[in-house]
Image (tube, rainbow, N blue to C red):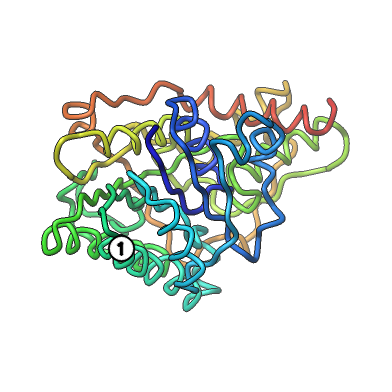
């Protein structure tokens, strides 16, 4: 039985990855940020399973800013694979929490790399990088050799973690991989992300509990996939014979407006009757053409996204309606 160590296991990606690895007969050890240790809704079904919780799934409260809180469970676990997913990952909030974002997302990655290097048996290491490292790219689509030029604090912190992962791979011989993840969504997406905000509001409007949906710039474009596809890519990246960096993306661009329209279509309502824009929700800097080229992951790992954008949004709306009892 392989052992995996996941930081940010309570998040969208971490919870789906835990499910994937448990299904592959892994023993999974997960780190939950101490300040949010009570918020484990994405793991409730696993914690409620007596055949899983504390049998093949073990959870620890820790903080990336406190090295000792990570080191102890990491050394005790002695994992075969580490999946580093934890970060302050909201781009908009990174402008309000610049230092915190850099400490957690940037330096937190460095701390974990250093701990990994010093383990008696170095595990394989996956770092969840982000398309935000590319900023407003001059070329499209973006791939593994696109210049790193972040324009947000979150992007800069991820760029630091990405480069440090490459440095530890080249100079210390770690099996260290960057997965450069483009936007990916699911019903488990954080409530402060625009995709979840839209789908929840649409469900509330359908249920008669909300009058309108207030948004910022709906022309912003992204390459959106489904989180389940992306965590499968993470696992595949660590099964390859040699450590390399991979872009995980759908190669398709959609607008925020497309999410709005699909979400309202899912409940048979006309979006234009319920949507209002406000300047306060516009981001300071927002790249307009971010789309990934996942050809390398397709050729080397055999990875392809399987869940469409349209299916993803419909699933998210259904989840919100079920949560409201509609």
From the image, tell me which residue sits under label 1: 113
Residue depicted at 63% across the width and 42% down the height: 196
Comparing 158 with 118, the one in front is: 118
| Left or right side of 161 for 103 | right
Q: Locate the N terminus by quadrant.
A: top left
Residue depicted at 61% across the width and 25% down the height: 315
| Left or right side of 23 for 298 | left
Q: Quadrant of residue 2?
A: top left
Vertical comparison of 312 with 110: above or below: above
Give the x, y percent position of residue 89. Answer: 49, 58
Comparing 181 with 235, the one in front is: 235
Residue depicted at 85% across the width and 31% down the height: 207
Give the x, y percent position of residue 283. Answer: 51, 62
Instruction: Say how many tags the image has.
Output: 1
Give the x, y percent position of residue 128. Answer: 37, 50
Q: Quadrant of residue 151?
A: bottom left
């Amino acid at each position: 039985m392989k052992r995996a160590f996941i930081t940010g296991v309570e998040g969208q990606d971490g919870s789906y990855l835990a499910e994937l690895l448990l299904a592959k007969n892994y023993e999974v050890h997960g780190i939950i940020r101490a300040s949010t240790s009570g918020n484990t809704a994405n793991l409730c079904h696993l914690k409620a399973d007596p055949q899983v919780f504390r049998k093949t799934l073990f959870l620890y409260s820790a903080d990336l800013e406190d090295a000792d809180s990570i080191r102890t469970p990491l050394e005790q676990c002695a994992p075969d694979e580490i999946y580093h997913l934890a970060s302050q990952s909201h781009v908009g909030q990174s402008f309000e929490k610049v230092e915190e974002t850099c400490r957690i997302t940037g330096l937190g990655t460095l701390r974990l790399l250093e701990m990994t290097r010093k383990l008696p048996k170095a595990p394989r290491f996956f770092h969840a990088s982000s398309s935000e490292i590319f900023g407003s790219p001059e070329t499209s689509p973006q791939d593994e050799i696109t210049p790193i030029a972040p324009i947000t604090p979150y992007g800069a912190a991820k760029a630091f973690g990405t480069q440090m992962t490459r440095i530890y791979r080249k100079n210390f011989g770690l099996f260290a991989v960057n997965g450069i993840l483009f936007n990916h969504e699911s019903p488990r997406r954080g409530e402060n992300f625009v995709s979840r905000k839209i789908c929840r509001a649409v469900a509330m409007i359908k249920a008669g509990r909300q009058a309108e949906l207030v948004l910022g710039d709906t022309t912003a474009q992204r390459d959106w996939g489904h989180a389940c596809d992306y965590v499968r890519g993470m696992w595949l990246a660590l099964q390859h014979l040699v450590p390399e960096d991979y872009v995980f993306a759908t190669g398709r661009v959609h607008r925020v407006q497309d999410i709005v329209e699909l979400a309202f279509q899912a409940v048979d309502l006309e979006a234009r009757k319920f949507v209002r824009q406000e300047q306060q929700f516009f981001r300071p800097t927002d790249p307009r053409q971010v789309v990934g080229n996942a050809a390398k992951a397709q050729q080397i790992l055999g990875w392809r996204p399987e869940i469409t954008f349209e299916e993803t949004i419909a699933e998210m709306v259904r989840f919100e309606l079920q949560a409201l009892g509609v």
